[in-house]
Amino acid sequence: MEIQSLQQSLESELTKNSKASILQADTWCVPVHTLNVTYKPVVRTKMDILMKMLFLSLKDTQFESAEQISEILLVEQLFVEDLLSKMQKTGLIAKVESFYQLTEKGQKQFANGVFEEEQDETATELLYSPTHNSFLNGDLEEVLEFEDFPEQIFRYQIQQNEPTLEDKLVIQELQAINEDNDDTEENKLFITSIDSVEDVQVNDVPCIEFLLYEVEKDLFTSRVWNTLLDKWDEQLEQLIGENEKSTWRDKLAQK
């Protein structure tokens, strides 16, 4: 795919059934970082009756074995052993001086009535643009198919060698992606912490900029097509307008 062909197609779209004329067209690139994020999602489920009974028992009484608990609760020992193993593995209980005790984590989950089970570590790639100050969703592979990348860079770009992001912002993005991909309410995945964020590479994303003028309304408009988003980029349009609105008439005078 060629940038020039895309530009011609967009020009036709902008001027079709419109009284606006294109005063200027330009192409440039904006930097977008590929971030490799690793994390361990958790599955949250409501505690079943047996788990609640087990929590209550351990809260008030000291037990040394699954056999003792099964006798008190009148539950098969095999079920109790399985649940105790799961609760130990997830850090909800621990053996202290040979007795089972609730951990601080266990007490908190018991109070909430929700069981959180940590899943295997997962790695996901996110695309972040310092210029937009946000994550972008798009197909980077399609962008890389362009044959003629513009050499010019966006004049108002914000370049960061290694973007510094708060974990909560990364978590919000990951959670939003998981919710988009998850159609069920049961056993939903939640991201509560981030293990690592690695800045893998910086990608040049081509954009096509147009300055339009409509005589009847005496109206100038900046339009920017972002090839990663595959749509008009309102954030970049606004950024250009904020910095150049006062000089647009000078460009009209030059025509």
Image (cartoon, rainbow, N blue to C red):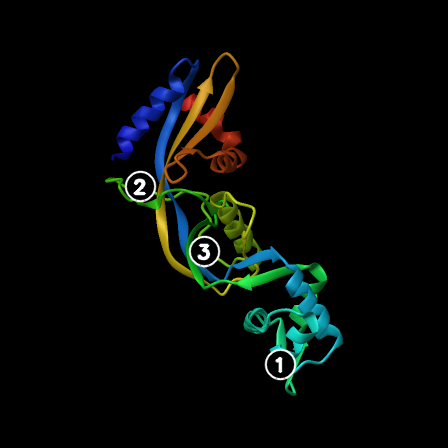
| Residue underneath mark 3 | 160
Q: How far apart are marks 3 and 1 (CA)?
A: 56 Å
Residue 141 visible somewhere in the drawing:
yes
- SS of the residue under disc 2: helix
Residue matched to label 2: 142
Residue 79: give x, y in percent of width and height.
57, 68
Amino acid type, mark 3: Gln
Whichever of callouts 2 and 1 sits on the residue coming sooner in the sequence is: 1
Q: Which residue lies furthest to the bottom in this view?
A: 97
The amino acid type of the residue labelled 2 equals: Glu
**Rendering coords of residue 203 (x, y %):** 35, 50
Measure the C-alpha gap from mark 3 to mark 2: 24 Å
Q: Which is more N-terminal, label 1 or label 3?
A: 1
Number of labelled discs? 3
| Pick the front one: 248 or 239 | 239
Q: Which percent across, then down, holds residue 167? A: 55, 59
Residue 65: mark in rendering: 1
